Image: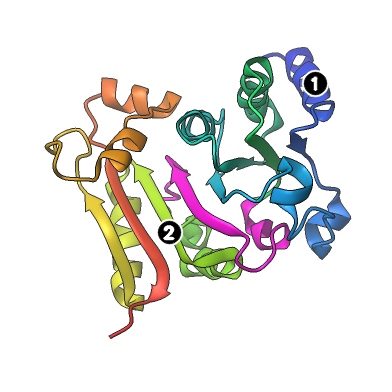
Amino acid sequence: MGRKDKLKKFAEVSEMDHVIEPSREQMFEGTLPLKGKWAKEHFGNDNPIVLELACGKGEYTLGLAERYPDRNFIGVDIKGNRIWKGAKTAQDKGMTNVAFLRTHIDSIHQFFGPQEVNDIWITFPDPQKKGKRRRKRLTHPLFLERYRRILHPSGTISLKTDSSHLFDFTMDTILEHGLEVIHQCLDVYYVGPDKFPDDLMDELEIKTFYERMWLEEGKTIKFIRFRPWIRSN
C-alpha cells in the first residue's frame, strides 16, 4: 500500500463518527469522556458491549454485529489503515451497533469503566514467539489483569488462533492461575455439530482474512473460551 493511500485512509477514518481516536493524553491518563458510558453516550442504548482486540480489518466485529443486533461491538486496533476497512463497511451498511477504537491494547483498561465490557474476542493475534516478547502476548497475565479491570464478572475471553505456540501458552496460563475454561478445541473445523452450542458454532464460522489464508495453507484453527477469574471451589 502506497503512502498516499494510507494517508487518505487515515484522513477518512478521522472523519468517521464511529471511529474513536484518543489523544495521547487520554491514552495515558484514562480521560476519554466515553469511559464508563459507551453504551449510553455512543450507541444510545444499554446493550451489552463486546470487544474484538487486535481487530485488524474488523471481520469479527462486523460478523458478530450482524448476528447480534442487540449487542454493541467495538473493534480495537492501533493500525488506522486496517480499521478503515471495517469502519467503511459498517458505514456503508448503516450498522449502528459497531464502533472502532484506535489505540494500543496495552492501554485498554484506560478506556472502559469497571465491568463495562461483557465479553472479549481475540482473533489471530501475533503469537509473539520470541521468549523476550512473551509479555506482549495478548493472553499474558499482564493483559488478563487489564481485562479483569473492565470485564463483567460473568465476562468471557475467546481466543481463536492458528498458533499452537500461543494456544499452549494460553492453556498453561489458565492452568497455572486456576482460571475457568468454558470451551476449548484443537481443530474448530474438525469437530461435529454437537461439540459446541449452536450460537457458538455460528460465531466460529466467521472467518478473518488471515484465517482464510491459514486454512488454505492447511493449518488447523484452535479455539478456547475462558473466564479470567480464579475458579470457585
Residue bearing the label numbered 1: 12
Regarding residue 162, the answer to whether it shows in the image is no
Q: Position of residue 185 (x, y in %)?
A: 21, 48
Left or right: residue 74 compared with residue 141: right
For marks 1 and 2 on the same chain, the one whose residue lies earlier in the sequence: 1
Secondary structure at badge 1 equals: helix
**How many numbered discs, if any?**
2
Q: What is the magenta range?
A: 105-130
Residue in view at x 42 percent, y 40 percent:
124
Residue drawn at x 35%, y 42% is: 161
Q: Is residue 124 left or right of residue 145?
A: left
Name the quadrant containing residue 190: top left
Residue ID for mark 2: 156
Q: Amino acid at mark 2?
A: Thr
Q: Is residue 175 above or below residue 95?
A: below
> Circle 2 — which element?
strand
